[in-house]
Amino acid sequence: MSLRIPCPCCGGRSVHEFVHAEIRRVPDHLTDPDERDLDFAFHHDNEEGIVTERWFHALGCRRWFEIRRDTTTDRIIEAAES
Amino acid sequence: MTTLLVDGQPIEAHAGESLLLAMLRAGLHPTSGGCVCLGGDCPNCLVTVDGIAYTRSCQVKAEAGMRVTREHVGDEEPALLPDEGMSAGSAAPVRHVHCDTVVIGQGDSGREAEREAREAGLGVVTLDARDGQHVTGVYPGPLVVAADGGGRVLHVHPRREIVVATGAAEIQPVVPGSDLEGLVTARAAAELVAAGIDLGRAVVVGESPGELPSGSLAGHFPLGHGGWELVRFEGNGRVEAVVLRRHGDAGAAEERIECDTAILGLGRNPRNALARMASDLPVRVVGSAAAESELPPCPRDGTVCPCSGVTVADLDGVWERGFHEMELLKRATLAGTGTCQGGVCLPYLRSFLLERGGRLQPAFTARPLNRQLTVRELAAGAHTAVTARSPLHDEHLRLGARMDRAGGWWRPWTYGQQDDEYRSVRESVSLGDVSSLGKMAISGPDAEAFLERIVPTRVATIRPGRCRYVLMLDERAHLLDDGMLCRETEQSAGDRFFMTSTSGGSGFFELWLRDWAEAFGCDVRILNQTASLAAINVTGPQAARLLARAGARRLPAFGRHQHVRVASVDCRVVRLSFTGELSYELHHPAADARKLWRRLLEAGAGFGVQPHGLETLLRLRLEKGHIVIGQDTDYDSTPRRLAHEWAVNLNKGDFVGRRAILRTNKQPLDKRLVTLRTDDPPPPGTAEAPSAEGAAIHDGDRYAGYVTSDTGTTTGGATMLGWLYLDAEGRLPREVTVDGRPARRVDGPTYDPQGERARAAVDVASESPENVREFPVARLEASDLAAGAPAERPRLRRLEATRVSATPAALDALVERPPWPDTALAFRTAPDELLVTATPDFEVADDPHAIVERETAFSYVWLDGTTAERFLDRECEWRRPGARPALAQGEVAGLPAKLWFEDSRTLILTPAPYAAAFERRLTASLAEIDGDAA
Amino acid sequence: MNEFTERQMKLTWRPPKASYDVVIVGAGGHGLATAYYLATRHGITNVAVFERGYIGSGNSGRNTTIIRANYGIPAAVRFYQRSVDLYRGLEEETDRWLMHQQKGILWMAHSEAAVRAERMRAKLNTEFGAETEFVGPRQVEELCPELDMSGGGRWPVLGASYHPQGATARHDRVVWALAEGAMERGAHVHQNTPVEGLILDGERVAGVRTAEGDIAAGAVVSAVGGHVSRLAAMAGLRLPIRTHRLQAFVTNHYRQQFGPIVASSELFFYASQTARGEMLLGAEIDPQPSFSYRSSHDFVQDVCRRALCLLPFMASLRVLRQWTGVCDMSPDYSPIMGRTGVDGFFITTGWGTWGFKAIPAGGEQMAELIASGETPELIAPFGLDRFARDRTMADRGSAGTH
């Protein structure tokens, strides 16, 4: 066991059941300048602290959901706290 | 009394006593010396027990037949190479225990914590080293891992709290002679006396252990102000005298007291390693484990770290040379990196650094493992990755195929005769199993708009019944995967599509689609049919005739697809080509795959049909210049570099990667993936098939790229794909060398450049009727799960069911008034997805875009309630629902599973590609449970 | 008495000055190597290295100490081969025992697809100077008799690529030798002194802000591991970096000599023996970005399970200690070295899971860049500007490997 990820559909499961992703940004590609597209494609905030992120429950319901997590401790911020 | 062997000599042990007591009783010191603590805190009693070295003899019970070896006895290297008794790769069994609170340590404070928790109505698990429950660490989860004293490993999952009540260790002596035999801590002395072991004449230094046998006390010397300080122990192998002097007076005369045993009450150090490694876990430390550390005097001489053999002189040496931080002192001397993890040295390192540097430094980081379990024990509960099986796996084995892992699936690599396989495709007709392709049904009001935004091809112009090759790009415009996109022929409401990915991408396909669908806010239904549908590629000039003989009455033209009944199996027949020949891909329910495969072989017997493996397929596609994702593509593979601009339409609306294509197109092109042809034989000694993969390409003397794919040389030549760099003038060279062989860059495929063979016109009706085989049609019946019963020997069977993807509200309404028989079971696997053991002959009234499909992707087994609980205690680490009936989903035995709990039985569902592995793990686990019970 | 206690190196600590020619942020292997090569190759010694903890307290002291050059693309093979060569001479050059042992690395193939990939790797590596050959099962067994060639019955060894120059060294000693070499020539290293800000002079980075005060610098080099995004942000830069945990563990002393480094991409672990005799194992990074140094049980559990398939003798070894580092991963899983587009500010980052093996070459090349003002050819492909120039490194085969 490692980090436990709370899937809203299936309950808490080991991080191994999931795939991690950042929140997708949907910029207006038709008008964005190159510089903003470069940033969109490659750069990360790499935040030290609380982030909002997406997880896909690959070994369970196979759906995406969002959680908040502190990257300095890996603690999941429960919905009630945020 | 039990008998065990120490260095080959039998000794007797009292029932229930520790191995260390038994050895001391027999007059055998476990190591070459050092103070014995009996508390598991020092490395001075480590022995090898039944081949497992570094075993704390004070922490294991003496058992009959144990074979114990002492490291310092004899000078032969112990044989530790793989011995025949060790079953390769076996892991210890695990047991998952869920509770509210776990209490580690069962001394006074541990028992008190346990009592309080029980009075509060909490579920409590206690772990105590004296019962063999050695806690190796506290981890995120939270999780407490411990040996259980019976060969198993416990994974305790507390919901609320971990209570650390591990008590305190005794401070060990660090003076010259502290590595002699005959030194014991005060608590150890009391235990030895209680066990009736004779200590001889004993000197007590510091705190007294209490009552000693009359006449044995040779002197008691309290430490500290007004008392004494320890100077050294004297003796030859075993202690003969303790030397002390008055505290605080370096010039004071030394007192030498002769003895057989020195009893050392030097103070306590909390056993707080578990608490220190816990950081922000819900841990509470109670009792003496929570106390402040007592700092011993700064050591003057002697061994500080007995594990690594570090002396005070060593500490001084590195200090003088600038290693002043606790961690640097540790790393430079290796003090604290052995079995006891600083149990002996840490207090002395702190007092040393305080005296030298004038600053009290914190303890070094506490890291797992607190108690060193073996690799076999630590592997408990883990499984290696499983490779998925096509529904045709056993057919391939039956035909003598050599199976190989590729892209997460077992694929037939070759059936033995690669050249025959190749010829059957090129000259007659052949079958290829492509069931591992990713397959996805997509429908909904936004289906077309959604697909327009994620593939670079124009989707609007794919008319019903047509299909098109599509790329999948990331937002960097690097190629992720490719596949084909088919628009359904019949449209009842809105759009519906069928899309494939490569085998290697099939795991990623669904999450990628869903991710973008949500990001764009598109109203679509997505149903993953990767395991639901098998796929057989019928390819070769005689492909259409074979299908006609198998009863296909019509076949799609190139670039189209149709629902066709082939050999009495309902198929989606897609006509594109990867091999370069006339090809029909038959997508059909996985449950029908074996039937269809055998019937196709039967119907094609007159053409000498035979299957081809992956090895042949890789050669066939290369002659057509088709890329393989991962082999020919990389982190910079834009469509431009891949020479796939033809698959990109920049004039439609936005799609993932479009902006990046526009951006990168402004940069000068550096290289392109090209097809190379050489007619020269390969260099001598490299006759093996794809020998040029990885070879450098040269343009004269200039390094010009490297080969990514090679057909291997056949009939004097070879076709390759490779990265070719543009020259200084920005041109791609035409004539190059590969491994010294001249090669020529060719435009387009080397085989059938015009693509006439794949596009050949066919006439199914011309097949003479006497050749057409009739095959019986099977009636569709859903699995009758309600009537299923736990079997003696659990076998997984394929489930015949229906899967529905629809809006949550529509599914709510559907299950409210189910259109299926009462005997069917319906599992709501996601808010927008339902699995029901009925035939797919109903509609979802409230969602015209709902996808309702026959589903044979799962295998199932019923277990009786008790067996299921015992199996899941081992193979399922998460907390299971208490309610009945209940559905739960997650990892079981290392595989994805759906569990349906009824009052007295439990249904397990797992994807059919993993069913063989699941059954193997289930059987092994049940056998272990039987073994435990026996 | 233990032969592994350090008995040679001397670290000399001096108080910080108000100004240096070069300030390096981060006293790990790469930062100290940059200082070392500035001093030894270019005579630039008015240099300070600032470290928030103790020297080598980041990934330099937490890695699995493997040195090799068998990467997947020519630019990477050339760069890492330079590092392999520098490592081989480093003990003699510094006159310090770094426990450098050349032992060869075997990269197992358990499938035909992997056989092809390893054959390809061998050919490409050899072409660019990192000698590697594909060896069949019999030779694999000779090189590593402890292997269960059936892979526990499920992961048979069909062959391996063998890179004889694969080596290991003691990570701490490499760090200390470079620190000592820089310090004895006059460079300063300041421990427990975090850099809290960058001093900007218009568009130019002109120094660093520390608890000891502002320090002026002719050039500032970020050799930070784990917090590089935060430092770069102080210079107004957003980086293509995400930070992930990487874990590892050692067993107790194994009393027989275990020859080569063994790696398997399909089983996803690697193992080698330390100079002290411990078996050292590692595997992949944790999936989620994280700065936490917390170890997890599932890591040790899974890696033990996989290792048992190939190395069943390990069943009876005890795992002694596990630990965690944090790795800065770039989008193409290759390092980023060179200029940043901000005047006076240089960067060496993206060291992911391959930083240790690159320490000497990384330091040497960064020193040359700073001393000469010209980006050396060897690291030109690794520049931060490669993403904007559509020149991401195409080394998929090496992604995530140690």
Image (tube, rainbow, N blue to C red):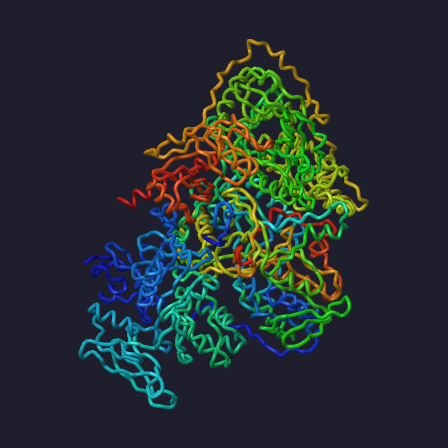
Residue C28, position as x, y percentages in the image: 59, 66
For the C terminus of chain B, which image quadrant?
Answer: top left
Residue B112 lies, with reference to residue B493, above or below; the image says below
Q: Is residue C107 visible?
A: yes
Frontmost residue, C315 versus B824: B824
Query: Residue C51's x, y, as percent?
Result: 60, 70
Report the label total. 0
Task: Give the residue displayed 39% in from the left and 66% down from the top.
Answer: B340
Say if residue B742 shows up in the picture: no
Above or below, B254 relative to B756: below
Q: Which percent across, then down, holds residue C397?
A: 60, 46
Q: Is residue B925 rendered to the left or right of residue B690?
A: left
The quadrant of the picture occupied by the N terminus of chain B is bottom left
- Identify the residue shown where x is 23% and y is 81%: B218
B3 vs C219, nearest the viewer? C219
Where is residue B695 shown, x and y percent of the image?
65, 42
**Which quadrant of the figure has residue B683?**
top right
Residue nearest the observer in this picture, B385 or B316: B385
Determine the residue positioned at 42% across, 58% down: B160
Q: Quadrant of residue C244?
A: bottom right
Q: Nearer the viewer, residue B437 or B487?
A: B487
